[in-house]
Image: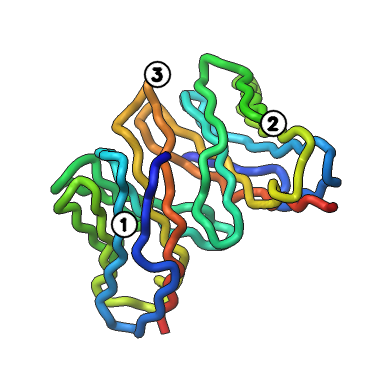
Amino acid sequence: GESVGLHLPTLSVQEGDNSIINCAYSNSASDYFIWYKQESGKGPQFIIDIRSNMDKRQGQRVTVLLNKTVKHLSLQIAATQPGDSAVYFCAEINTGNQFYFGTGTSLTVIP
Amino acid sequence: DVKVTQSSRYLVKRTGEKVFLECVQDMDHENMFWYRQDPGLGLRLIYFSYDVKMKEKGDIPEGYSVSREKKERFSLILESASTNQTSMYLCASRLPSGGVDNQPQHFGDGTRLSIL
């Protein structure tokens, strides 16, 4: 079956530093990947996505990197702010259009 | 912006009750989904619907049913609530898509359901 996991369940960073959150996936045929942010008491919020024909995509303060060779996805947040504190999780979409979600990494930003 | 609205943020029900969770989206999305979210288990798909009147079982449909009478509304029904159905329930919607045209799911803020 699908396996979408995160390397660390928690991550603490100093305000202003860059954050890197990692995700491993198991299905080499998956062709679409998404990062979501979930703040306490709220639903998951779409941050950024990337298709398998790309290895990097940038948004506002966020960058997603995709390494298909090792089936690894990462989310980089530049100049991390207190408002970035949340749980971040990745989603993998396979060629059958099925979504598989990771369990999440809790990011804490230290002022 | 896509708006997915779940009717209740918190709900407390008793064992054996029939429970209705409602979800409405305002972006004319064909696809709608119901998940439950539990600590350490991530999101698990209960049911989904690709269009009005259509429904498909997800990974954990037992004890649940759904209704999609209108395109914008997708209801989750707990036929006879049990304590192991205490959870956070999330509704999502998205445009129909696949392959090079894949689109993300957009989520509501969830209903935290407690079964006593």
Residue B15 lies, in percent from the top left, at: 34, 83
Whether residue B63 is visible, yes or no, is: no
Name the chain under label 3: B
**Tag in front: 2 or 3:** 2
Using the numbered discs, state the Cα–Cα distance from disc 2 to disc 1 in whole angstroms.
32 Å
Q: Is residue A62 above or below residue A11?
A: above
Using the numbered discs, state the Cα–Cα distance from disc 3 to disc 1 in whole angstroms.
28 Å
The reply to whether discs 2 and 3 touch (Cβ–Cβ < 8 Å) is no
Task: Tell me if B1 is positioned left or right of B71 in this view.
Answer: right
Residue under the point 34% across and 26% down: B98
Residue A53 lies, in percent from the top left, at: 52, 14
Using the numbered discs, state the Cα–Cα distance from disc 2 to disc 3 in whole angstroms.
25 Å
Name the chain under label 1: B
Residue under the point 21% across and 48% down: B55
Residue indicated by mark 1: B23
Q: Tell me the number on the disc at residue A61.
A: 2
Residue indicated by mark 3: B100
**Tag in front: 3 or 1:** 1
Residue under the point 24% across and 53% down: B73
Mark 3, other Cα within 10 Å: few <14 / some 14–19 / many ≥20: few
Residue A63 lies, in percent from the top left, at: 66, 27
Task: Tell me if B61 is positioned left or right of A88 in this view.
Answer: left
- Classify mark 3: helix, strand or loop: helix
- Classify mark 1: helix, strand or loop: strand
Amino acid found under the numbered disc labelled 1: Cys
Same chain check for tags 2 and 3: no
Q: Is residue A18 above or below residue B66?
A: above
Residue under the point 29% across and 32% down: B96
- Classify mark 2: helix, strand or loop: loop
Amino acid found under the numbered disc labelled 3: Val
